[in-house]
Amino acid sequence: MADHYYNSPDLKRFSEIGKEAPELADAFFAWYGKVFEEGALTAREKALIALAVSHAVQCPYCIEAWTDGCLEKGSDAEEMTEAIHVAAAIRGGASLVHGVQMRNHLEKLGM
Amino acid sequence: MGKVLPTLQKRRASLASGRAQQQVLSRVPLERSFRESLFASGLHPLRATGIGTLQVNVGKKCNQTCHHCHVDAGPDRTEMMPDEVVDAFLDVLGRTDIPVLDITGGAPEIHKRFDEMVIRAREMGRKVIDRCNLTITLLPNYSYLPEFLAEHQVEVVASLPYFKEGQTDAQRGDGVFQQSIEALRRLNAQGYGQPGSGLTLNLVTNPVGAFLPANQEAMEIRWRRELRLRFGIEFNHLFTITNLPISRFLEYLQESGNLEAYMTRLVNAYNPAAAAHVMCRDTLSVGWDGTLYDCDFNQMLELPLEGSAPRTIMDFDQALLEEREIAIGPHCYGCTAGAGSSCGGAVT
């Protein structure tokens, strides 16, 4: 397949999601904007969380957007790298902790 | 300090010419021109509102060669404001009530008459700003500066892109961060940035790359905490300044393949409120040779004043200059993006 499934310029077309369901899209974008405002967490902290989650859900659009977002909120590469290690640790840990399920089943079947 | 990079001029790069830079910028496709954005905001033609600051660029010589420098300043530059131009701008200050003299460069302290400019402007009761690269104050011939600047109550606006070494040295050269911290300590020791001293030390940060600066207020809180904890440094305010696509930053944008995306970023972040408060409306910029410009950026692009405004400081006419139309171009989007950008940081 010549084309990539994810193309960077497509992110600009995100608002097209509102064509068939404008009210839902409007509600989503309003809520999305509100989420990232300064609150109990700073906008910079929220951007770092967003960058980490972007990696956890492996969304190329989000990774690009939140790399920009983190830089423009004043974070540096060191902080951003630590943030994605947090995501990776949770993903890795989530796999590994299921080893308990394995052990439960093993113990049930074993002698 | 580490290795010193040659300037565009030394390398005979085409971008050493302001006109060549204008041509490069004019070829970048934009969704709308700056003129169209001003029209849409009801701000065209953009006019000066007065002259609150006389900003004099006294020369392009500098002991540093920062990667983002819009002046293409460096040790190999020889342009230096001649006596007749220094005399002319001091004369203008003397016969007007322009309240602020903003001295920039290059490293302006290298100018042989820097001390005299400061002393005379202060004697006239004007606020004087020294745009200082910090490291100059560690050189033997300039180590008197912290004490001198304090004695004459000069406001110091000092460049420090980040509170960590890697990012700072990446932008300003190897070893600059550690030297800058030492210079800040010496300024602090004179009272700069200390409560109640009356000595103002403001820091300037430009993004280390092709992105917009962070929120100035939030960054100032963070910088204050970090500089205090890590180095015991105190300062008054942090100014966030957008990198304009001029000179060496323009070269970086071109070579890194970021030029079009960066310009798009600036255009998309156009803020009419910032456009209404751009610093050129209240500033007059004087080049090393006495030529007048709307700002230091137009100066480096060799973009002269519009219309019938006088062209040099020797022909200064306050009435004409105070209502002049500002010369604009695509680079102006750099001052109107987001919270806006000026020599005093964000404008909204």
Image (cartoon, coloured by chain):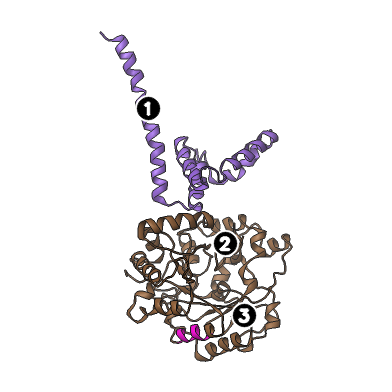
- The Cα–Cα distance between marks 2 and 1, rounded to whole angstroms, is 46 Å
Q: Nearer the viewer, mark 3 or mark 2?
A: 3
Chain in brown in the render: B
Q: Nearer the viewer, mark 1 or mark 3?
A: 3
Residue B187 place in picture, x, y as percent? 40, 71
Chain in purple in the render: A
Which chain is mark 2 on?
A: B
Residue B146 place in picture, x, y as percent? 40, 76
Which chain is mark 3 on?
A: B
User: Does residue A7 lie above or below B284 as drawn?
Assistant: above
Q: Which residue is mark 1?
A: A95
Check residue B119 in the rendering and tell me which mark sits there, or answer none: none
Q: Which residues are magenta?
A: B113-120
Q: Which residue is mark 2?
A: B346
User: Does residue B300 lie above or below A5 as drawn?
Assistant: below
Task: Tell me the SS state at disc 2.
Answer: loop
Q: Residues within 10 Å of mark 2 (few under 14, many from 20)?
A: many
Which chain is mark 1 on?
A: A
Left/right of residue B317 with respect to residue B123 in the rendered view:
right
**Quarter of the figure with the C terminus of chain A:** top left
